[in-house]
Amino acid sequence: MERTLVILKPNAVQRSLIGEILARFERRGLRICAMKMVTMDRGLAERHYAQHLGKPFYDDLVTFMTSGPSVAVLLESEGAIRIVRNMVGPTDPAVAASGTIRGDYATTTGHNMIHASDSVDAAGREASLFFTAGEMNDYSLAVKPWL
């Protein structure tokens, strides 16, 4: 099983899309292992997006991510990272296909509604920024035989 971190960004929260977006992941068969609403402080946002330090969009991204509450979610399934990234769509919502989260809800690249880990290493590092081991739940889905 593979875990991946998803963050519903402040504009997804403000637009009341939390339930709708999470429902897509659940209907796909991904299991929610942990979830919390968090308003990131600058330090957390900078640690989370450290790989983008020095890029032209970095300061706007950190400012955006600290502008209001986000929802951090840890999802699990076989191949979770690839599945979630396909469901999320490309960073640029102008090229994201209809049916993807960004294709359906986002309008700008900088404020594209959702973050999804891009590798196993990133998912582990990112999850540890938002959740302690005790907050990550392990349980079986009753529908697993049908997934």
Image (cartoon, rainbow, N blue to C red):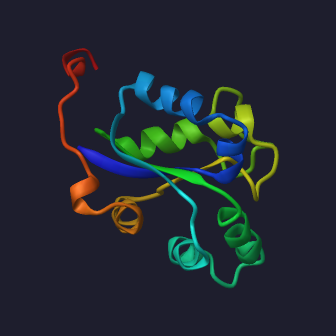
The mark total stands at 0
Q: In the picture, residue 140 is in which quadrant?
A: top left
| Point 23% across, 43% down: residue | 1
Front in this rendered view, residue 47 or 85: 47
Determine whether 129 is above or below 13 in the image: below
Name the side, left or right, on which 2 lies relative to 85.
left
| Point 18% across, 36% down: residue | 139
Q: In the picture, residue 124 is in which quadrant?
A: bottom left
Percent across and percent down for residue 28 are 42, 25
| Point 75% across, 42% down: residue | 106
Percent across and percent down for residue 53 are 63, 82
The quarter of the image holding the C terminus is: top left
| Point 67% across, 35% down: residue | 16
Q: Give the farthest residue toward the bottom.
A: 54
Q: Give the farthest residue toward the top.
A: 146
Percent across and percent down for residue 89 are 62, 41
Front in this rendered view, residue 116 or 132: 132
Percent across and percent down for residue 94 are 81, 43
Name the side, left or right, on which 108 lies relative to 82.
right
